[in-house]
Image (cartoon, helix red, strand yellow):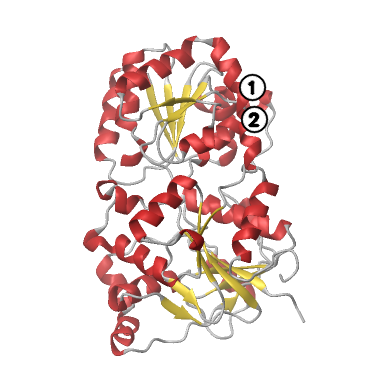
Amino acid sequence: MARPSVLIDGSQFLSKAATGIGSYGRTLVRSLRKSGTKVTVLYGQGVQLPRNAPPLALAVQVFGSERLPERRLVRYARNLPFIAGSLLGFTRRVQPLEVSTEGVNLDAFEPPLPAADTVLNASRLYERAFLHFLVKERLMRIDPPENIGLAHWTGPVTVKAKGVPNLYTLHDVIPLQFPYFVVDRGAIALRQHTAIAREADHIITVSEASKRHIMDLLKVQEDRISVTYQPTPNLPALEQVEAERLVETVYGATPGQYALFLGAIEPKKNLKRLIEAFLIANPGIPLLLAGPKGWLNKDDLALIQTVSAQQSVVRQLGYLPRRHVTALLKCARFFVFPSIYEGFGLPVLEALQLGVPVLTSNTSSLPEVAGDAAVLVDPLDLNQMTKGIRALANDSDLRAELAFRGPQQAGKFSEDAYQQRLAAAYRKVGIELSSTL
């Protein structure tokens, strides 16, 4: 009999905006397969195919370029039969189709899509699960494919597989702690998180800080939560000379003569204070901002545009390929990440791994990740941030010390340590990664 597989949702893998959760899911798939566990990834792309369509046609639709944005009214109209079924107490059975990836180069995606033992797609699954939740206030049950021993949902997904343990990774509870940082009409995020906390067989989170807040705000017992952290990521292989050439020729930046921020432009990233502190500190080098636009960023973008128009101290680079991000990190004089709250803070770990001096916040999970290998500041204290920027800009001995400590601190988040923590979490729902799966 074939070994059962772990079902992983692919709800974030095809979205460039979901950088954090998408990276988490890719790492999870890679680590499980490296441990010898079979993995099934379940996508929810909307597809329309005739019954006699060739197998490759499904892959073309699932992995095709992003769909044009739809008006909300059109989306609801398309799903009206499904919504009506939910209101009447029945829903159409979800029947995922196997997607053949033979001939599809998953590594060519940016970022690369995870290789799995089996790839499935259930048309509009996650969209319909969300609508079902709005109607019924409960997670949508699906019959898992055969040979599934465990379902691991990588975020607050409103789906639950029948007949198997269901684990949910809650990275943080930011919509509950900082409702002004998100768009959440009708407190939907609170309702989603509450339902997941109630129905999950076990919850995984990525820091002790997030664990405490999940326990406090969602009233989850401690034995129902496991902290696995995240492992150091597999960054693109790039020699220093290659990185320097890329930074100089593509971005017109001088290696060692700029500071770098990496992350989405959104309220919790604290960019307005960072830019203000950088201007006051006047370190004599520019600040480069790399990452997607995020949300609720009108004020941040206006400030960036104003500063950029007057002087070249701040430059917005936008969303970049992973190879370019790695090059910019390797060549930065220092990395700044004074976020107000992070469930984990993967960009900090990436910088530490590469031996880049880091300034980050002394709040949430960031001290757990950075340890004594970074300059820690109160993200709400402009004076502390200004002093930290000046210190990193001007003190070469401090930078050398942090560059030495960084890789040592990053080593605490090895993939082996992550696999052990993950195995311990799965064991709590009766799944043994080393033998059962």
* Residue 404: numbered disc: 1
- In the rendered structure, which amino acid carries the disc numbered 1? Phe
Q: Position of residue 216 (x, y in %)?
A: 36, 54
Examine the image and state in which quarter residue 96 appears. Answer: bottom right
Q: Quadrant of the N terminus?
A: bottom right
Q: Position of residue 304 (x, y in %)?
A: 31, 29
Q: Nearer the viewer, residue 268 or 295?
A: 268
Q: Nearer the viewer, residue 144 or 116?
A: 144
Within 10 Å of the Cα at label 2, are there few (<14), some (14-19), or many (20+) other Cα atoms? some
Position of 261 relative to 54 (above/below): above
Examine the image and state in which quarter residue 100 appears. Answer: bottom right
Position of 420 relative to 83 (above/below): above
Q: Give the side of residue 257 with respect to residue 340, left or right.
A: right
Helix, strand or loop at label 2? It is: helix
Q: Position of residue 49 (x, y in %)?
A: 51, 79
Q: Residue furthest left?
A: 186
Identify residue for label 2. 407
Q: Position of residue 415 (x, y in %)?
A: 67, 47
User: Is the Cβ of the residue at disc 2 closer than 8 Å to that at disc 1?
Assistant: yes
Tell me, yes or no, if residue 299 can be seen here. Answer: yes
Within 10 Å of the Cα at label 1, are there few (<14), some (14-19), or many (20+) other Cα atoms? some
Q: Give the side of residue 361 with respect to residue 227, left or right.
A: left
Tell me, yes or no, if residue 354 can be seen here. Answer: no
The residue under the point 48% across, 69% down is: 45
Q: Nearer the viewer, residue 366 or 59?
A: 366
The residue under the point 60% across, 17% down is: 401
* Residue 115: numbered disc: none
Position of 292 relative to 160 (above/below): above
